Image (spheres, rainbow, N blue to C red):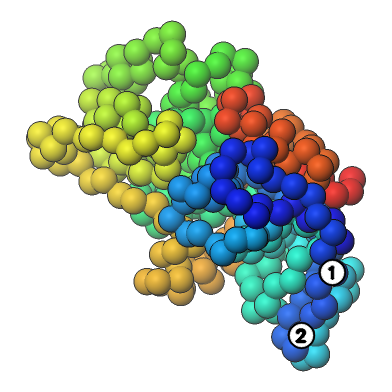
Amino acid sequence: MRAVVCDRLGEPSVLKIEERPNPEPGPAEIVIRVGAAGVNFPDILTVAGTYQHMPELPFIPGVEGAGVVHSLGVGVTNWRKGDRVIFGVRPGAFAEYVKVPARSPLLRLPAGWSYAEGAGFRVGAQTAYHSLVHRAQLRESEVLLVHGASGGVGLAAVQLGKHLGARVIATGSNDRRLAIVKAKGADEVVNYRTADFVAAVKELTAGKGANVIYDPVGGEILEKSVRAAAYGARLLVVGFTSGGPSRVMSNHVLIKGLSILGVRAGETARRLSPELGRDYLEQLPRLAALGVMRPHVSHRFPLERAADAFRALLDRKVVGKVVLEMEA
């Protein structure tokens, strides 16, 4: 099989295509023929050597994808050959075939969804669901401020927040991309490069501010967000696509009674609360069947152009998701 391989850490250009043996399923294992794999910002960090989970070199990047069950190991009864599935791995998705344990939390690909859409669902949907439902406990009619709203995890939060009954204010740095975000459900959009999003949020909320702030950007955006927060607001720290952490002023946290919540969807389920993993398996397919958080795929690349897919993310060209496609 063909696979994208990282044998040294660095820029996207270090990635190469290699031929690897097709995986064979052992007992209680499943081999999936990959149709498409989602590309996420943590993939870039992993290849650069700056992510918190570092696989041993060489490794095949990619943590999510969609495809069809190709072969089953002895004892596997919960899936059948030919089933179309959404999968997660840590890592290994950027290949034509991937092997996962039968107990792996696979999701069935919804009817009518392409492999590309399925490949872009898991990370964004799980992050948004954990953030808004488990961590922030977002309530109907609350104001949700979503930063980085044109990215995969941001757009999923916009869609889920609207489904949960919140008023959604979305920010980003490009009017064209924000127009797509608004079409996907945001009530208002703010370009923070051309407007002061703090002033805009205050004006839109009659001076009260946002009840929940969802931030995968970090840096100055999170630092300014405390001034856009309502009293008792919950600030969700989802990531640092801006390139670094933030310095949040503790006086704002104290005076406004803010809660700052770190978001680690998969890690929380593994370390603290296995029942959260079961909740994902029940709720994410239900939401997907309703069309909630159906990914918007703006960029598709063949496996050989994985480095270009990384650069599209780095250059902020992507709206929603970028995927590597093995087949249509």
Query: Residue 36: in sight, yes or no?
Result: no
Which is more toward the observer, 206 or 159? 159
Left or right: where does residue 110 sit relative to residue 106? right
Mark linked to residue 26 = 2
Mark nearest the camera among 2 and 1 is: 1
Left or right: where does residue 15 sit relative to residue 208? right
Residue 241 percent coordinates (x, y)? 46, 35
- Label 2: which secondary element: loop
Image point (48%, 30%), residue name: 148
Image point (61%, 51%), residue name: 8
**Mark 2 residue crowding within 10 angstroms, few (<14) / some (14–19) / many (20+):** some
Image point (35%, 44%), residue name: 236
Classify 157 as above or below 299.
below
Query: What is the C-alpha distance between the residues marked 2 and 1?
Result: 15 Å
- Label 1: which secondary element: loop
In terms of image quadrants, where is residue 74?
bottom right
- The amino acid marked with disc number 1 is Pro
Mark linked to residue 21 = 1
Sequence order check, earlier mark of 2 and 1: 1
Q: Dividing the image into 4 quarters, which one contains the C terminus?
A: top right
Residue 265 percent coordinates (x, y)? 46, 58
In terms of image quadrants, where is residue 156?
top right
**Mark 1 residue crowding within 10 angstroms, few (<14) / some (14–19) / many (20+):** few
Mark linked to residue 116 = none
Left or right: where does residue 4 sit relative to residue 125? right
Which is more toward the observer, 138 or 51? 51
- Marker count (numbered): 2
Residue 130 percent coordinates (x, y)? 45, 55
Classify 35 as above or below 72.
above
